[in-house]
Image (spheres, helix red, strand yellow):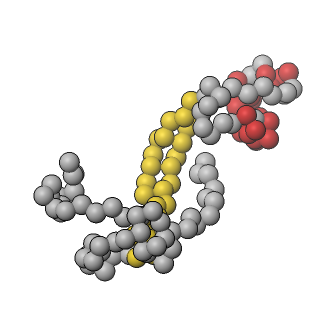
Amino acid sequence: MSSDPHTSEDEPRVTVAVQLDVTETVSYGFRAEVTIPASVAADPAELHDHMAQDEELWLDSLDPTGAMGGSIDVLERAIDSVTLCAAGDGPASEVPRGAIRDGGPLAPGCSPKGSRERET
C-alpha cells in the first residue's frame, strides 16, 4: 500500500488539503499549417531552424490538452514543494492534532502561487 519505509499499513490515515508545486518537462507532437519560404520547405535542417526561430508560426496550433489529435508525453516530473494547508482553506480543512510531525510546513492558505512559465 505504501512505499514509504517510515509508515506502516497499520498507521491511521488522515485526509488533508495540500498545495503542490510541480514542474514537468513535456514533449508535444501536433500538426500545424504554416506559410514559409519555398527554400525552407525544401531543406529539413533549414525548416527546423526556421520553425525554432519563429514560434509565432506554430504556437497557436499547440494544444496542451492533446484533444485536437496531438500527442503529449511527460518526460520528467518533479515535486518542487508540498505544503499542508491550514484548517479552513480547502475541502479537507480539519487537520487532526498530531498529523503534523517534526514541525512540518503549515501554510496559512491554499491559494495557487500563480501561473508558471513553461520549461523549454
- In the rendered structure, the answer to whether residue 89 lies left or right of residue 52 reads left
Asked whether the viewer can see residue 82, the reply is no
Residue 106 is situated, as x and y percent measured from the top left of the image, at 40, 76
Question: In the rendered view, would you say 74 is above or below 8?
Answer: above
Asked whether the viewer can see residue 115, the reply is yes
- Residue at 20%, 48% in the rendered image: 1
- Residue at 80%, 36% in the rendered image: 57
- In the rendered structure, the answer to whether residue 116 lies left or right of residue 98 reads right
Q: Residue furthest top?
A: 42
Residue 22 is situated, as x and y percent measured from the top left of the image, at 48, 56
Q: Quadrant of residue 99?
A: bottom left
Question: In the rendered view, would you say 88 is above or below 67?
Answer: below
Q: Nearer the viewer, residue 90 or 76?
A: 90
- Residue at 74%, 39% in the rendered image: 59
Residue 74 is situated, as x and y percent measured from the top left of the image, at 48, 40
- Residue at 34%, 72% in the rendered image: 95
- In the rendered structure, the answer to whether residue 101 lies left or right of residue 74 reads left
